[in-house]
Amino acid sequence: MPAIDSLTNHQVRLAARPVGLPTRANWDFTTEAVPEPTSGGVLVRTLFLSLDPAMRGWMNDAKSYIAPVGVGEVMRAGGIGVVVASKNPAFAAGDTVSAGLGVQEYCLIPEAELKRNGIFKIDPRLGSLTQWLNVLGMPGMTGYFGLMDVGQPKAGDTVVVSGAAGAVGQTVGQLAKIHGCRAVGIAGGPAKCEWVVNELGFDACIDYKSGSVRDGLKAHCPNGVDIYFDNVGGDILDHVLARINRKARIIICGAISQYNNTAPVQGPKNYLSLLVNRARMEGIVVFDYADRYPVAVAEMAAYLKDGRMKSKEDVAYGMDTFPEALLKLFNGENFGKLVLQVAD
């Protein structure tokens, strides 16, 4: 590899806060020199970046579970990379790591930022690098702890998950089947629905683009819904709330149908179903479970190895494609976990 002082870091920075869908005008493409790490710090070369619906929320100047990305800052993103220089005994050049790398080719993480950044070494023997951004990464952790801790599935439960062909949804449905539940997905388009049923083993999948979600739930959940893992919000959430059982658990993971609204977020109209059915609705923020990630990784890596779980990634290529690749999340184009490959 060339000397660090000869390298250039290409970055994508937030130029202006978007109104509605972000466009290329909301981003600045910048370059800067790559610095050497200082005492205790680590320099990482980015290989793959995770593109997630939550990134849209991070662009807004609003109170949330995490501070917004500042205008002029490198866009926040988790990723997989390789350590190219280290002045910290916990990391060595050549280590493969998961970290908050941002949308850039190189990320310098000072010693004081290591814990907040969440950097940790990964074992490529447990799964491919893209799987470490999917079932073994943040989406997989979200699905695991959302379903297992918040949903508390029991054998025989009917579990419905929206965004079933996406990163979190594919993990939730497969885990539900492993734990003896009936899994019903909601996804957009026949190809996604067929994959969810035929490849992932869901019991059924409702195509929200070609039919009535209400009718699909009635047909495929004849005994009602015990657990709903919500990734989309909006009308689909209301349709499911109309079908929930007594003591149902609704996990609020995201509301991708609402993220680019220019009007106020649409809340649930059928929320009184929670009262009537003595049901519970609870949010899941994956960072709350960070100290337990190794347990979930070990369990799901075993499922990948023995074939009980599959993992599908949709890979886009090149930093310059970032603005358009991100939009795939919001128009339903991605098929599987959306990943941006930055380097080989």
Image: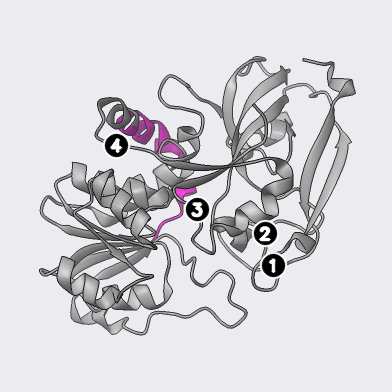
Q: Residue at 18% across / 76% down in the picture?
A: 277
Which mark is first along the chain, 3 or 1?
1
Could you give the CA–CA distance between mark 2 and mark 3, rounded to whole angstroms? 25 Å
- Please indicate, yes or no, whether residue 101 appears anywhere in the rendered image: yes
Q: The C terminus appears in which quarter of the rendering?
A: top right
The x, y position of residue 2, in whole percent, is 82, 16
Which mark is first along the chain, 4 or 2?
2
In this view of the protein, which residue sits in the foreground, 296 or 2? 2
Residue contact at pointers 1 and 2, CB within 8 angstroms: yes
The x, y position of residue 11, in whole percent, is 78, 43
Q: Residue at 17% across / 66% down in the picture?
A: 220
The x, y position of residue 34, in whole percent, is 84, 29
| Residue 64 located left or right of residue 192 | right
Circle 3 Cα neighbour tier, 10 Å, few/some/many (<14 / 14–19 / ≥20)? many
Could you give the CA–CA distance between mark 4 and mark 1, rounded to whole angstroms? 38 Å
Which mark is first along the chain, 1 or 4?
1
Circle 1 Cα neighbour tier, 10 Å, few/some/many (<14 / 14–19 / ≥20)? few
Type of residue at label 4? Answer: Met
Residue 115 on the magenta segment: no
The label on residue 68 is: 2
Type of residue at label 2? Answer: Pro
Q: Quadrant of residue 247?
A: bottom left
The magenta segment: 283-300
Judging by the rendered image, the residue that carries numbered circle 1 is 61
Judging by the rendered image, the residue that carries numbered circle 3 is 334
Judging by the rendered image, the residue that carries numbered circle 4 is 309
Residue contact at pointers 2 and 4, CB within 8 angstroms: no
